[in-house]
């Protein structure tokens, strides 16, 4: 039997086997590896979903915390019974509805705390309105709607809501500048000189070899040996150094 005929007969013997493989241990191994791969993909997808939910929950909690701080600073213990109070209650309801637990119960709990004057019918209408159309605001958009000034934002340490009078780009630049200042202060406390002071006192500026009457390379060589600070005796040229090592040639050798 030729090689071609043998290959065709092996395919005909197992039509359900994957192309290029015969039925047996090889096919079972491939199927097991494929199942493991699919299970790994599903596990990673579940982990990504859990992490996304965790981040979303953490942001919502921080946003609600910042809203409560701002409302307490603005109103004290409760919102007023007017259009402004109702608008702020709507903003608060939109955020607490995304907390863990039943959205309607969360809204009712927080709104009753801040708006004790709101009757049951109005509260039920607010819950239906929030559930019918959830709204998410960016930091700057919400800051402008609330009228949150940057000075108040800084005082209350609000992180998830922007200031209506300072843009996000300006806040980012300000934060970067503060980090640079803090890093510089830490370096100065550790004994690191400022660039200007370092350059002003650098050897390339002061040139101590000129005061000693020697060359730059000779001065560095002597400093390495701990012999800097003493100028050369130029009264007799025969006593001058002939090398960076400081070797002095006898006068008798020079006169020959």
Image: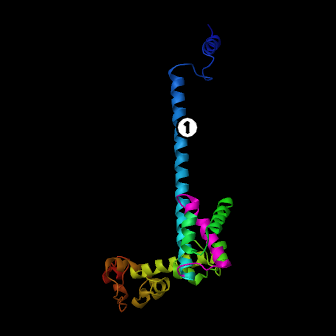
Residue 89 drawn above or below residue 22:
below
- Please tell me which residue is depicted at 42% across the width and 87% down the height of the picture: 208
Q: Where is residue 130 shown, x and y percent of the image?
A: 65, 63
Q: Where is residue 69 shown, x and y percent of the image?
A: 53, 76
Compared across the picture, whether 253 is left or right of 95 comes to: left
- Please tell me which residue is depicted at 66% across the width and 78% down the height of the picture: 84
Viewer-side residue, 203 vs 183: 183
User: Can residue 195 be seen from the camera position used here?
Assistant: yes
Viewer-side residue, 25 vs 235: 25
Residue 146 appears in which quarter of the rendering? bottom right
Residue 122 belongs to magenta span: no
- Please tell me which residue is depicted at 66% across the width and 79% down the height of the picture: 82
Residue 187 drawn above or below residue 107:
below
The number of numbered badges drawn on the structure is 1
- Helix, strand or loop at label 1? It is helix
Disc 1 target residue:
38
> In the rendered structure, which segment of residues is drawn in magenta?
76-105
Compared across the picture, whether 245 is left or right of 58 comes to: left
Residue 98 belongs to magenta span: yes
Q: Where is residue 33 shown, x and y percent of the image?
A: 52, 32
Residue 127 appears in which quarter of the rendering? bottom right
């Amino acid at each position: 039997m030729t090689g071609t005929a043998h290959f065709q007969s092996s395919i005909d013997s197992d039509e359900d086997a994957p192309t290029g493989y015969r039925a047996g241990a090889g096919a079972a191994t491939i199927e097991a590896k494929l199942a493991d791969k699919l299970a790994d993909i599903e596990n990673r997808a579940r982990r990504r979903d859990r992490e996304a939910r965790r981040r979303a929950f953490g942001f919502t909690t921080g946003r609600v915390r910042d809203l409560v701080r701002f409302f307490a600073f603005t109103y004290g213990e409760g919102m007023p019974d007017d259009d402004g109070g109702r608008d702020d209650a709507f903003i608060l309801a939109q955020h607490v509805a995304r907390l863990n637990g039943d959205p309607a119960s969360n809204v009712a709990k927080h709104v009753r705390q801040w708006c004790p004057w709101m009757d049951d019918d109005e509260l039920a209408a607010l819950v239906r309105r929030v559930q019918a159309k959830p709204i998410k605001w960016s930091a700057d958009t919400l800051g402008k709607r609330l009228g949150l000034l940057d000075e108040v934002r800084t005082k209350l340490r609000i992180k998830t809501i922007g200031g209506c009078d300072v843009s996000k780009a300006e806040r980012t630049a300000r934060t970067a500048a503060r980090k640079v200042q803090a890093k510089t202060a830490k370096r100065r406390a550790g004994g690191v000189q400022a660039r200007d002071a370092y350059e002003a006192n650098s050897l390339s500026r002061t040139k101590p070899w000129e005061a000693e009457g020697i060359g730059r390379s000779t001065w560095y060589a002597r400093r390495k040996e701990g012999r800097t600070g003493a100028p050369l005796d130029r009264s007799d040229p025969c006593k001058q150094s002939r090398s960076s090592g400081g070797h002095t040639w006898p006068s008798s050798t020079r006169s020959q």
